[in-house]
Amino acid sequence: MDLFESFASGLSPVPGGRSAESFLAQGADEVSVVRLWVRPDRRGAEGWAIEVALLTLLRGVVPVPEVREVRRPVGEMPALVVTSFLPGERLDVLLPDLTGPALQKVGESLGQLLDRLSGVAMLRAGEFADAELSIAPFPPGERTAGRACLVHGDLGAARVLVDPVRLEVTGLLDWEQAHAGEPGADLVTVRGWAPDPLADAAEAAYRRFWP
């Protein structure tokens, strides 16, 4: 029996996830996430392979799920990816209850991770095209960068997991919009939604390394 079959009897939709595509799988002593690529995402038919490559690249750099099993699409069967289940609560759920000092602590943790992402250098700006993370350049003049790095591209509060006790970021989720782009782009995104204490702390932590 393979990993997916050992979990199949205990599947349930991921709360807040794609109800038809993402499931929690309860095994004997662990929880995993099973995602089916029923429909191509914005990256096309290779979206699942790009996602696996990104999670593999980022493992140990920032908190992302560990890839446990991959099944390529065959005929009408969609691609299937099994990953670990990350601990923590979604930041958008926690935000209303966080006060100044707590917001600052979360912001500092998030800023440190943004720093690490900016350190994942890319040769040029563009979209990831395949499982080798080959880069298809943006059209001339569009989102170009003197130095390119890995950008999450959609780092809203719902895509950040936080330990509600330690107030440290435990996961960055949903890498569909990831691309090679301008350093600091994710910080700009965070500043668009985060309360000032969180955003200021995130920027201060980031600027220690990238002034």
Image: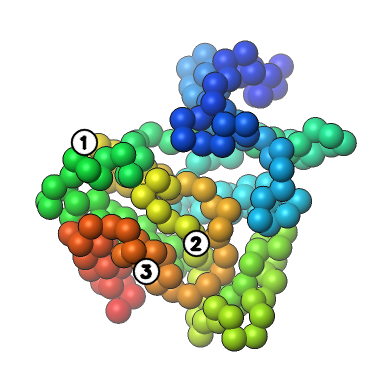
**Secondary structure at numbered mark 1:** loop
Instruction: Tell whether 197 sits left or right of 154.
Output: left
Give amino acid for label 2.
Gly
In x, y percent, where is residue 30?
48, 22
Sooner in the amino-acid sequence: mark 1 or mark 2:
2
Do residues under tags 3 and 2 come within 8 Å of each other at their CB atoms? no
Instruction: Check the image and report above or below for 152 versus 49.
Output: below
Sooner in the amino-acid sequence: mark 3 or mark 2:
2
- Front of the two marks 1 and 2: 2
**Secondary structure at numbered mark 2:** loop
In x, y percent, where is residue 101?
12, 51
In x, y percent, where is residue 145?
52, 81
User: In what quadrant of the picture does the C terminus appear?
Assistant: bottom left
**Nearer to us in this view, 193 or 90:** 193
| Residue 188 - label | 3
The residue sitting at 58% across, 53% down in the picture is 176
Instruction: Check the image and report above or below for 34 versus 140.
Output: above
| Residue 153 - label | 2
Q: Find disc 1 in the rendering and name its residue.
A: 165
Give amino acid for label 3.
Val
Residue 112 visible here: no
Q: What is the crowding at mark 2: few (fewer than 14 residues within 10 Å), some, or many (at least 20)?
A: some
Give amino acid for label 1.
Val
The residue sitting at 48% across, 17% down in the picture is 29
